[in-house]
Amino acid sequence: RETVVPAMMEQFKYKNIHEVPVVTKVTINRGLGEASRNNKALETSVKEVALISGQQPIVTNARTSVAGFKIREGVPVGMAVTLRKDMMYSFLERLIHLSLPRIRDFKGISVKSFDGRGNYNLGIKEQLMFPEIEYDKVDQIRGLDIAITTTAKTQQEGIALLKALGMPFNDN
């Protein structure tokens, strides 16, 4: 906060300190897919997301039956965790400084994943990049989605905010 806020105020010529965009929440989401039929896979997936986020996820159930996907109403289809305040900042710090550099052939993350309103979405293909996950205890490689929600009004403000926090964007 001591370094990000003055840099953002100078860059975007804000008059009030409350105009500076902040990260409001980080949402971690994982779809279960085939694991929705398997209770053991559901439990291990919940434990992994709890280890990664530091908070117990909510298991989301199907609202309606979909015959094409063999889904019945009320069957677990995914899980989600919403992190705010201290938990959010500690997760972002671990993500930026520990987890992302552990990805194979990592050259930075794409700037194209912004939604145009300053929010960033990041898809992760495997959970092994997080240091909390032990390689020997993983039964199947599953990905997860991370959505970083900010109060930025434009994409440029969102990029500047996450760059100031240390997010490693590639320059392409």
Image (spheres, rainbow, N blue to C red):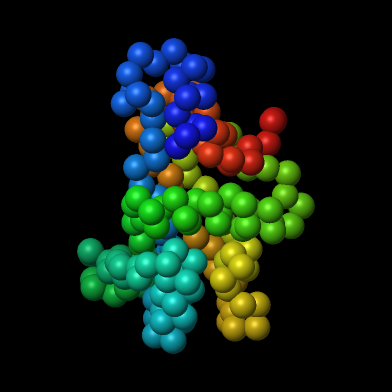
Q: Which quarter of the figure has residue 77?
A: bottom left
The answer to whether one can see residue 139 in this image is yes
Q: In the picture shown, does residue 154 fall above or below 162?
A: above
Q: Is residue 16 left or right of residue 28?
A: left
Percent coordinates x, y for residue 155 in the rendering: 47, 26
The answer to whether one can see residue 116 in this image is no
Q: Quadrant of the N terminus?
A: top left
Q: In the picture shown, does residue 120 fall above or below 27?
A: above
Q: Residue at x 38, y 26 (%)?
A: 20
Q: Residue at x 23, y 71 (%)?
A: 73
Q: Quadrant of the C terminus?
A: top right
Q: Which quarter of the figure has residue 23?
A: top left
In this view, which residue lies farthest toward the bottom?
A: 40
Q: Residue at x 59, y 83 (%)?
A: 137
Which of these two is toward me, 124 or 68? Answer: 124
Q: In the picture shown, does residue 145 fall above or below 9?
A: below
Percent coordinates x, y for residue 30 in the rendering: 44, 63
Tag count: 0
Percent coordinates x, y for residue 14 in the rendering: 39, 16
